[in-house]
Image (cartoon, rainbow, N blue to C red):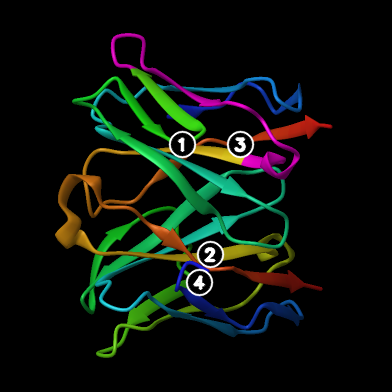
Amino acid sequence: DQQVKQNSPSLSVQEGRISILNCDYTNSMFDYFLWYKKYPAEGPTFLISISSIKDKNEDGRFTVFLNKSAKHLSLHIVPSQPGDSAVYFCAASPSGNTPLVFGKGTRLSVIA
Amino acid sequence: DSGVTQTPKHLITATGQRVTLRCSPRSGDLSVYWYQQSLDQGLQFLIQYYNGEERAKGNILERFSAQQFPDLHSELNLSSLELGDSALYFCASSNPGQGALETQYFGPGTRLLVL
């Protein structure tokens, strides 16, 4: 039973355009959502997070949107850069100091 | 650099053997989490320690065990290894003092190959 789903295994975007990565969850107890970026042979790197009391959080080129009623969140990267090419994981937890539940990841390729 | 260190980076061993993976959390972080990433899988939570005590358990096999020491470093012990245990093992740490927006920071991982 996958509680966090990233239905697109891969995404290809032109440099300078917007990348939109999607994530759906099923557990209504999830209260805190994070996006991590992972390069090969490295650990996941924290990108941005959002708590359930917000519907949007922005940090530079990265914006996360949360739609609680639809149990859906998305990560927007604008403008996309070749260095953004990596696997992006969506993760969720019911509260702080609890384990994260991860999606299987979306591989983003930004083409110059 | 997340500040979380893991050793060794790579480990090759044979079935039936036992190995120990080590993790040093970021300075000041009391929580340590262990995750496993198998081929084509997302990260699966194994176990969490908080200030030396086990706090949560996930899909951890009985052949696996962990502990967190007084200096807050943690070790994950994998025994009677099977081919299917080959995976990337990540450690993450966090500071629960951050409250609801606490973030887990991940180490570089240990790649285990069981032959």
Which residue is at a point 66% across and 41% down the rendered structure image?
Answer: A87
Q: Amino acid at mark 3?
A: Gly
Query: Are tags 3 and 4 found on a single chain?
Result: no
Between B45 and A110, which is closer to the camera in this rendering? A110
Q: Counting residues from the N terminus, which is met first, the one under dot 1 or under dot 3?
A: 1
Please, is residue A11 above or below residue A85 in the view?
above
Quarter of the view holding residue A107: top right
Dividing the picture into quarters, in which one does residue B52 lie? bottom left
User: Could you give the CA–CA distance between mark 3 and mark 2, rounded to whole angstroms?
Assistant: 16 Å
Q: Nearer the viewer, mark 2 or mark 4?
A: 2
Q: Determine the chain carrying the residue at label 2.
A: B
* Residue carrying label 4: B63
Which quadrant is the C terminus of chain B positioned in? bottom right
What residue is rendered at 24% in x and 46% in y?
Answer: B101
- The residues tagged by marks 1 and 4 sit, at their Cα atoms, a distance apart of 44 Å
Q: Are marks 2 and 1 on the same chain?
A: no
